[in-house]
Image (cartoon, rainbow, N blue to C red):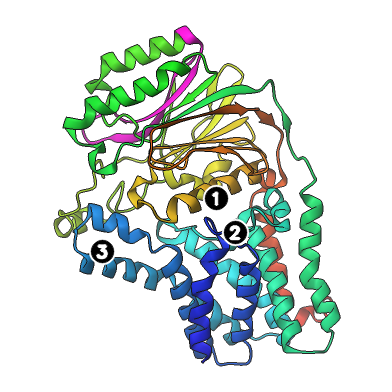
């Protein structure tokens, strides 16, 4: 019965995230998991955590199957089994959290659920987002963008918001399990939400110059046609014609690899774009592959017009943009038909793209899922831009989840954020993570609006994850160290 409940709770948890956005499910679901971890063996806790992870991540990121099926072997037995193996692997993280919760010595069940469980859950999210290139998708803090806990995002970041949520869930779970001090426990469960609501009214950054007009060009070129040589001319014409009425807009952005060709293959087209941007006074950003040699090529965002600069994607997608252990795996995976899958990573540290008073912090594709990647350009950058191509995942939850993650990065940074995608969802996001405007999906569209560059630093931009790490360490010491009994008495 407990095992079935764990699986069901996991299946329900993705509804806390976009596109459903029932954020209240996250604290309730996690509190219920903590209850299932109460008074059981390490093995049983690990099994319940694993089933919870299977439901949560199987439902939440099952869209991985779409790209494997379309660009690997087009056999469901292959794409479904590969997706299942991936989900089974990343579900080990909540399983390990459950095992450690019951295995580590704690000073009592109150400390175990109110301190140790939140720390271990947060650590499991961090580990999933770090090891083996990382998969920082569906962090519980991301689900709270439209809740009072959003006030914690510019202070502690998304993973810090996960810890705050988990602390609330731990107090709630303990209040359910025992009547002693129930009123105090319920107050402890509510307090993070009240503090978050107060923090939401704090303005951590300030405007840096006048507002700028923006045009984000969404070509909606089907992924099956994007890299076809026969479709290149039509793709170039589509982007050029969509952009033509908007020359003179302060900032124009084309999405990731909008131009499916190297600069040397389309020099006249690029020269014409540059001349149009210069004549119109537009800051023009476009995604395309660039190359230094035949063996070294990059997924790039190029700035043309009022200035020339380039950002090369650093955090590449394994099996999508590069093949781990290439010499070993390539013979077995030659059937993969992913175009341009041998990219070279760009430098780990790259300056913001400068165009007059604009200093643009750039990320490409899922780089914006990593708070550390976005922070690299801060606080120097006064505007953030992400170009992406979520067409790999079709009409699934993935583009909605990715947009939510981008909004979280905007709130953490206190910067307005432009998101340009091939098939949607393109968006203009304010410095609190609010959606100013967005595009429809799967149709050619030009999203227009205004952004205001901002300066200053949120606490998260200044110090990153150090306060979170220290808080987790302190909670861990309070929960399991007898030597701290006088400081952290029950």
Please tell me whether mark 2 sits on a helix, a strand or a loop.
helix
Using the rendered image of the protein, determine whether residue 292 is visible from the camera's viewpoint: no
Residue at position x 75%, y 40% in the image: 204
Question: What segment carries the magenta color?
Answer: 279-307
Q: Which residue is mark 2?
A: 143
> Percent x, y for residue 195?
80, 58
- Residue 118's image quarter? bottom right
The residue shown at (43%, 68%) is 59
The quadrant of the image that shows the C terminus is: bottom right
The quarter of the picture where residue 245 lies is top left
Mark 2 or mark 3, which has the lower sequence index? 3
Residue positioned 27% across, 16% down in the render: 267
The residue tagged 3 is 79
Does the residue at mark 2 contact the one at mark 1 (Cβ under 8 Å)?
A: yes
- Mark 3 → mark 1, Cα distance in angstroms: 26 Å
Where does residue 384 sit, x and y in percent of width and height? 56, 34
Q: Dots 3 and 1: beta carbons under 8 Å?
A: no
Q: Which mark is residue 404?
A: 1
């Amino acid at each position: 019965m407990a095992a079935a409940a764990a699986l069901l709770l996991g299946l329900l948890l993705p509804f806390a995230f976009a596109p459903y956005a029932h954020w209240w499910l996250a604290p309730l679901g996690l509190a219920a998991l903590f209850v299932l971890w109460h008074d059981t063996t390490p093995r049983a806790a690990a099994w319940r955590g694993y089933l919870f992870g299977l439901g949560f991540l199987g439902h939440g990121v099952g869209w991985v199957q779409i790209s494997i099926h379309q660009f690997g072997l087009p056999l469901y037995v292959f794409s479904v089994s590969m997706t299942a193996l991936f989900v089974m692997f990343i579900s080990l993280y909540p399983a390990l959290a459950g095992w450690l919760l019951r295995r580590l010595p704690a000073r009592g069940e109150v400390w175990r659920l109110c301190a140790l469980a939140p720390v271990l859950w947060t650590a499991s999210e961090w580990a999933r987002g770090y090891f083996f290139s990382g998969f920082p998708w569906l962090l519980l803090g991301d689900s709270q963008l439209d809740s009072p806990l959003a006030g914690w995002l510019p202070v502690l970041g998304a993973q810090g918001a996960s810890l705050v949520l988990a602390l609330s869930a731990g107090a709630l779970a303990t209040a359910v399990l025992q009547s002693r001090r129930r009123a105090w426990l319920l107050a402890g469960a509510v307090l993070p939400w009240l503090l978050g609501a107060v923090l939401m009214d704090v303005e951590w950054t300030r405007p840096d110059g006048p507002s700028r007009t923006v045009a984000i060009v969404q070509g909606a070129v089907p992924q099956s046609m994007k890299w076809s040589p026969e479709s290149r001319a039509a793709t170039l014409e589509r982007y050029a014609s969509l952009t033509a009425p908007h020359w003179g807009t302060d900032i124009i952005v084309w999405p990731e690899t909008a131009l499916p060709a190297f600069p040397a293959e389309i020099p006249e087209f690029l020269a014409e774009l540059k001349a149009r941007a210069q004549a119109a006074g537009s800051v023009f950003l476009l995604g395309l592959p660039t190359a230094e040699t035949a063996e070294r090529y990059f997924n790039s965002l190029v700035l043309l017009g009022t200035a020339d600069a380039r950002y090369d994607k650093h955090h590449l997608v394994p099996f999508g943009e590069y093949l781990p252990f290439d010499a070993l795996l390539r013979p077995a995976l030659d059937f993969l038909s992913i175009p341009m899958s041998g990219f070279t990573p760009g430098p780990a540290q790259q300056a913001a793209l400068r165009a007059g008073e604009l200093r643009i912090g750039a990320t490409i594709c899922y780089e914006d899922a990593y708070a550390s990647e976005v922070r690299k350009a801060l606080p120097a950058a006064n505007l953030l831009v992400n170009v992406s191509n979520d067409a790999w995942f079709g009409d699934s939850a993935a583009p909605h989840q990715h947009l939510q993650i981008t909004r979280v990065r905007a709130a953490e940074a206190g910067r307005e954020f432009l998101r340009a995608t091939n098939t949607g969802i393109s968006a203009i996001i304010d410095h609190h993570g609010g959606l100013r405007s967005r595009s429809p999906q799967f149709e050619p569209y030009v999203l227009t609006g205004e952004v205001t560059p901002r300066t200053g630093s949120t606490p998260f931009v200044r110090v990153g994850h150090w306060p979170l790490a220290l808080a987790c360490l302190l909670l861990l010491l309070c929960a399991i160290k007898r030597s701290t009994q006088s400081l952290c008495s029950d």
